[in-house]
Image (cartoon, helix red, strand yellow):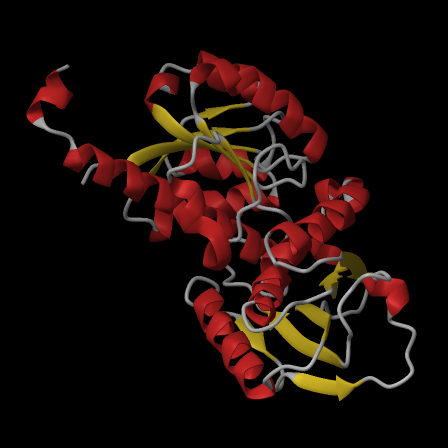
Amino acid sequence: MSKTKVAIIGSGNIGTDLMIKVLRTSDVLEMGAMVGIDSASDGLARAARMKVPTTADGVDGLIAMEGFDDIEIVFDATSAGAHRANAAKLAPYGKKLVDLTPAAIGPFVVPPVNLDEHLDAEATNLNMVTCGGQATIPVVAAIAAVTPVPYAEIVASISSKSAGPGTRANIDEFTETTAHAIEAVGGAAHGKAIIVLNPAEPPLIMRDTVLCLIGDADHDAIRASVEEMAQRVAAYVPGYRLKQQVQFTELTDEPVHTLTGPDAAPVTTKVTVFLEVEGAAHYLPAYAGNLDIMTSAALQVGEGLARRAARRGADRTPEQVTA
């Protein structure tokens, strides 16, 4: 089938890594434009060397480009504030937006959990939550598939060197958006998110801790559900892995009602899952697994949208095609 043309807004680390993934690995997506605001950025220079059309005039430059009408999907890898402005400018043109910022304008999408339900939805703006959300929400959802989760908390620890200006400018949005998505996508009744910027040298790869409070449940079923989910994530993020077996700690007199709320079901057990995410090093260093999981997840969404659109086109009758 013919490839779907996409544009990427943001010529920084995330946008450039996503561009290289599209060019090197996708059999359904084709780069139609790389968009930045700094004509001297490495991302725009690399795009030009790879024969990708570029503009340094931001989203206005994208709209003015000759091939803009042929672009069906726009990835935004800028910042939460910039995405709100970009989405408003692109709204009249009917493009599908895949938002890699924590702006959270559209519904949250975590591919192994809820991608299918959003491919045919009317929403034109799909939000990729955050890097911490992409790494940990699948685990929360795996536990919630076995038993109710009154409370879930995640800690995402990333190398300071992998936290660019966009990440640093959006720390509040990171924690708020991730916590909301833990509930909306992960299925926890209450969610909390913490991010740690680790200055260690040499830089450490992304490490995540997921803590869930649950009632009485089948521990073996939870372990199996988490392990199966980890395999699903690793199918598109090969460096994603469990550091050890899922841990269960029985609770006795801990005042967990301060976390779960007074009306929650009885909580008897703390479930702890330790993860690490090593990047594929397409453009970013391997320790930047936090950025790699975001671009890999966004690629899954873009490819899913392209394949679903192709199937809909193939299902159309000759009369519908000529109408």
Q: In the drawing, does residue 130 fall left or right of residue 54?
A: right
Q: Residue at x 78, y 64 (%)?
A: 264
Location of residue 211 (image quadrant): bottom right
Q: How many marks?
A: 0
Return the residue nearer the eye: 189 or 247. Answer: 189
With 199 as the anchor, is 228 left or right in this view? left
Quarter of the N terminus within the rendering: top left
Task: Provide residue 49's location: percent of width, then percent of height.
Answer: 42, 37
- Residue 113 in view here: yes
> From the image, which quarter does the C terminus lie in?
top left
* Camera-nearest residue between 267 and 322: 267
**Residue 289 horizontal/vertical position (percent):** 60, 62
Q: Position of residue 55 (x, y in %)?
A: 50, 22
Q: Residue 40: x percent and y percent?
A: 61, 30
Work out which residue is located at the far left of the displayed protein and give it: 318
**Residue 289 in view in this figure:** no
The quadrant holding residue 102 is top right
What residue lies at 70% left-to-right and 51% top-to-bottom?
A: 178
| Side of 200 relative to 37 (left or right) | right
Residue shown at 69%/70% (left/top)?
Answer: 207
In this view, 66 is above or below 200: above
Vertical position of residue 101 compared to residue 150: above or below:
above
Q: Is residue 150 above or below residue 100?
A: below
